[in-house]
Structures are given as structure tokens and as C-alpha cells.
Image (cartoon, helix red, strand yellow):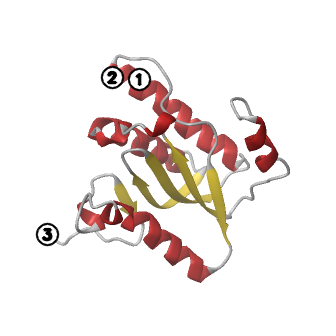
Amino acid sequence: MAHLRPRQRVLRSGRRSETRRIYLVTTCTYADRTIFGCLLCGSIVVAEIQRQDALRTTITMAYAVMPDHLHWLLELRSSQSLESVVAQVKGRSALRINKARGRAGRIWQPGFHDRAVRATDQLRRYGDYVIENPVRARLVDRPQDYPLTYASWWHPPDG
């Protein structure tokens, strides 16, 4: 739990993640900088989320990489803790973003917020919350128009 402030440690103490549980994770950029307004930087975060799916540590239901934060709805599929999986996504994406930008420094705020999805009706509500984020922020008119959002229930267009 490195880099957590004392209050954050207290909030996370005693928290345990469960395999096969679905979580809504939210984490912000350091100092709320709009790093992911850069499509390349946001795409790096997407690639790291997809990497976790490929490693079978997660199944992603939905995500929205907003200019200054990430919402990720996922099912934890491995014995790794949720904290470990989120730390991998944040750590690997930060290294790659800094390399792509030719810079050093923090990308993410320490810690993250998570909420366990406990009922089927919550799943769709949380999923809609995630994918509607770019619309609420007035970045696009429809969630599908935002390049850094995904929902597993979307179907590719015919053609």
C-alpha cells in the first residue's frame, strides 16, 4: 500500500476483494490534470485495461477514460487483489505515458475508489453511469462517439 496517505490506509484497511466479484473503480489523475485529453495517452490506459483482460485477471464490462479520471467496471477473475490489478494498470500506463511524452512525473493520484456490484440491476445502472460520463461532461452527444469508452453490451455496426 505504498503511496497512500494515512487516511487512505485507514479507509482501505480490512478491505478485501473477491474473485468473480464485479467492481466499479474510479481513479483520478494527479492534481486533476487533463492528461487523457490526449488521445494517445488515453489509449495507453485502454491498452493496459485490455492487457488485464488478456491476462485473464479481469473481464471488463465498461470503461470511460475521461480527460482527468478513469471509470472501470470489471469482474475480478484472478486471485490477485483488486488493489494489485488497479496498481498494475496505473503503474504500467504511467510509465508508458511518461515515455510517450518524453517526461517524468506522476500521472495518477494515489489510491482509488471502488464499489462492489451486489445485484444485477446495479450492474446495468453502474454500466450506464460509466459510459454516459462523456455525455454528461459534454464531450460528445452519444457515448459511442467517445473514442475512450467501451461497453461489453455494445455490438459492432453491421457492414
User: Where residue 84 appears, x then y in whole percent?
Assistant: 67, 41
Q: Is residue 118 left or right of residue 27?
A: right
Decide: is 77 above or below 156.
Answer: above
- Please tell me which residue lies in front, 112 or 20: 112
Quarter of the image with the C terminus in it: bottom left
Residue linked to disc 1: 98
Question: Whole-Å distance between the Cαs marked 2 and 1?
Answer: 5 Å
Q: Residues within 10 Å of mark 2 (few under 14, many from 20)?
A: few
- Look at the numbered discs 2 and 1 and tell me whether their residues touch, using CB distance below 8 Å: yes
Going by the numbered disc 2, the residue's amino acid type is Arg
Going by the numbered disc 1, the residue's amino acid type is Asn
Q: Residue at 36% x, 57% y: name it.
A: 149
Q: Is residue 38 left or right of residue 114?
A: left
- Please tell me which residue lies in front, 55 or 131: 131
User: Where residue 3 appears, x then y in whole percent?
Assistant: 68, 30
Going by the numbered disc 3, the residue's amino acid type is Gly
Most distant residue in the bottom direction: 121
Residue linked to disc 3: 159
User: Where residue 99 appears, x then y in whole percent?
Assistant: 39, 20
Give the quarter of the image for residue 42: top left
Q: Earlier in the sequence, mark 3 or mark 1?
A: 1
Q: Is residue 110 left or right of residue 6?
A: left
Give the quarter of the image for residue 114: bottom right
| Label placed on residue 101 | 2
Give the quarter of the image for residue 97: top left
Numbered disc 3: secondary structure: loop
Question: Whole-Å distance between the Cαs marked 3 and 2?
Answer: 37 Å
Decide: is 93 above or below 123.
Answer: above
Q: Residue at 29% x, 36% y: name it.
A: 40
Quarter of the image with the N terminus in it: top right
| Label placed on residue 3 | none
Decide: is 92 above or below 23.
Answer: above
